[in-house]
Image (tube, rainbow, N blue to C red):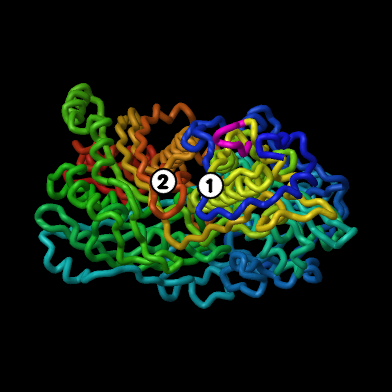
Amino acid sequence: MTLEDQPLVEDCAPEDLLEAPRALKKENVQVKPSLRRIVGESVPRLEDPALLTGQGHFLDDIALPDVLHVAFARSAHAHAAVTRIDVEAARAMPGVHAVLLMDDLESVVTTRRMPLSAAGAKNTTTSTPFILSNDEVAYVGEPMVLVAARTRCQAEDAAAAIEIEYDILTVVADAREAAKPGSPIVRRELKTNVLNSIEVGYGEVDEAFGKAEHVFATDLWQHRGCGHPLEGRGVLAEVRPADGGLYVWSSTQMPHDLFYALTGVLGLDENHLRVMTPDVGGGFGPKYCLYPEEFAVPAAARLLGRNLKWVEDRRENFLAAIQERDQFWKLAIAVDANAKILGIRGTLVHDQGAYAPKPVNLPYNSATALTGPYIVPAYYIEVQIVHTNKVPVSSVRGAGYPQAAFAMERLLDLVSYELGIDRAEVRRRNLIPLDKMPYTKPLKARSGAGLVCDSGDYLAAQAETLARAAWDDFPARQAKALAEGRYIGIGLANAVKGTGRGPFESGIVRVAQSGKVSVFTGATAMGQGIGTALAQICAQQLSVTPDSVTVISGDTTMSPLGIGGFASRQLVTAGSSVHIAAQEVAAKAVKAASAFLRIPENDLELVNGRVQSCADSTKSMSLGDIATALRGAPGYAFPAELEPGLEARVHWKTDALTYSNACHVAEVEVDIELGEVKILRYVAFHDVGKRINPMIVEGQLHGGIVHGIGNALYEFMGFDENAQPVTTTFAEYLLVTATEVPPLELIGGETPSPLNPLGAKGVGEVGTIPVAAAIISAVENALQPFQVRITQTPILPPTLFHLVRAAQAAPLKATITR
């Protein structure tokens, strides 16, 4: 039978295909994909139909038979010794199945306290939280007793009936005081409140300051904020009596982290544990950490032999979910006569809260990111990481980068103010120019890799943003408004964000005999559209439509290896893995079709999910046909040089970060009688490399900017002098709503990164990083008739009101710090 006489693949049984002669192996064959462009298109998000029609599957939507509901009795004090816990009344209440202390869990756990990150149960320190705290409590909201009942209401009533007696101990609420020798200790097991002291720097700092024409100094305070996801944290544990296994669902950004930690803490064989993440109603950083509840609930489930569910309510989120910031900076900047930076030095005191559930990364990020997109020849900062009797601190969107940008941009505004040079010009003189790219900073990332700004035109980005915002015309607009009694101001800020943090992320691409394409990844979907983006990447290589690709993420059984979602990393890492895996599947499909169709590989192309002859499209095989043939059949020879199955598994590795960059300009109006700030206009430039889906990018940037507006003007997590939280509802803690957000004018740059095969950079956090700096700069500019200097964030109406009143009462400059 000649090639022309060969029947179409549809008419062949799989066993017939297996007997087809194998074509000679071709080296360096390039798969010819369809001309359809998928990557780079605003494909509608595949996740949205379910989410928008109420069909999402969040943790609280998961229904298991015979489940008990959990509530926790929590500490009412910021620091106290526990002298007595009486649970008898609670145990006798209707519907209550169990009331458990830490001693009760002792038989099913290998340690009383959480491991540090996912390094195993033995890796505990005096800074990791206890699973349940029964001897001493170190912050308000610390979990102490677990109650399991038929309903959540019954569990909460029982938790409230538990009688706990305390011996109140001295509270340390201010990190600066806690760091001083002789300060009361946050927890009795500690010898000092200073968790760690680090020094970050390079160059001849003393020499730079000695030869400087000008030296300016400032103190800054950046206060705590929260993540506040749509759905709070939650854990559901299902016991599997048949095999002694345990299924755990958690609303987490890090299912694999939790998997490895639980295997150690519960002493489980890895084959007996499965951790899954359902739809996550936003992560924003707080779900990057592991929590005592994520260990207590599975431990109690194994002890009781019952399925248990705990879903955090909003008050618990305020009391017990990690927060970010409370950083106190003392900084000085040395410049020459032309405002060129010679050096920066200073100190940073970082409030870590009562514990460190993760290795402490945030203050190190802040310290190493301070120089941002600018050339700083010499730099030194001493960082103290200090425990206080407050909720533990870790990452919220940006993980230290927004704090660093705020500090740097405030310094540059100070230089501009003192020297009388336009703020944009001061920045222009110090930005890293294009001809120095890639620009290596004399600093190291936490991984030990060098910090290299790999690509981007920072000067052009600023110029384009200023032009769009009509920066040069603003003085005339401002003078006109002032004549009308209106105080308007304009501010700008630049930022860079290291993204795509390694070491790897998993990507498995598999074609079923039905032709259905599946992607499995250790990346975690958190509402950011990662499923759509990975489907687009895969579909582009296999010449199928994105909606024909199913992406399964956040399941430790489906993807045994994975890292998870944080640091704007998943599009770069998981995307690169899926990209390469899909290429390998496409190449294998062509190689197989070449054997089955007896057509040289170079004469085949992949079009609309079919491998076909370039000359005659009727000679073709679908991906499903090829997958069926590669399934194998007993008694038939398998084609030489082909492995069974149509799939590929890739763990793309990287140590380097790729840097997204941004320039934001904010225009505001300040009501000096009310201290109210209204954002009149917001222009934002972002270069996030190759945009896989521009619509998703735009949505991420909108969300990031709105988050930053909250950091600048609204979100203040208050504590009194006894470290009691005073903003525990949305009546006191203000989130940004639609009425506070102006139309956001986005400008898109696209400088592909040379560090990954997609040319992509992360986008989830970069939108947040310069916002507070730009808005505070604009507010300060609006109040320049009063010579007000603003050195904190957020800046709330009462603070602004008193600043203006103080300036009106005194001819000297008004300034405020904590």
Label 2 element class: loop
Label 1: how many residues lie within 10 Å, few (<14), some (14-19) or many (20+)?
many
Residue sitting at 61 percent across and 37 percent down?
A: 612
The outermost residue toward the bottom is 191
Count every numbered label the image shows and give the total.
2
Q: Amino acid at mark 2?
A: Val
Residue sitting at 64 percent across and 39 percent down?
A: 549
Q: Which residue is mark 2?
A: 766
Label 1 element class: loop
Regarding residue 175, the answer to whether it shows in the image is: yes
Residue 556 drawn at (x, y percent)? 69, 56
Regarding residue 140, the answer to whether it shows in the image is: no
Residue 145 drawn at (x, y percent)? 74, 59
Label 2: how many residues lie within 10 Å, few (<14), some (14-19) or many (20+)?
many
Residue 175 drawn at (x, y percent)? 44, 63
Residue 613 left/right relative to 480 = right
Residue sitting at 53 percent across and 31 percent down?
A: 43
Q: Which residues are magenta?
A: 610-617
In this orientation, which residue lies closer to the viewer: 760 or 271?
760
Q: State yes or no: residue 700 in magenta.
A: no
Q: Amino acid at mark 1?
A: Phe
Measured Cα–Cα span from mark 1 to mark 2: 13 Å
Q: Which residue is mark 1?
A: 284
Residue 167 left/right relative to 430 = right
The outermost residue toward the right is 242
In this orientation, which residue lies closer to the viewer: 567 or 199?
567
Q: State yes or no: residue 612 in magenta.
A: yes
Question: Considering the image in quadrants, where does the C terminus appear?
Answer: bottom left
Q: Are marks 1 and 2 in contact (CB under 8 Å)?
A: no
Name the image quarter holding residue 369: bottom left
Question: Considering the image in quadrants, where does the N terminus appear?
Answer: top right
Residue 338 drawn at (x, y percent)? 11, 53
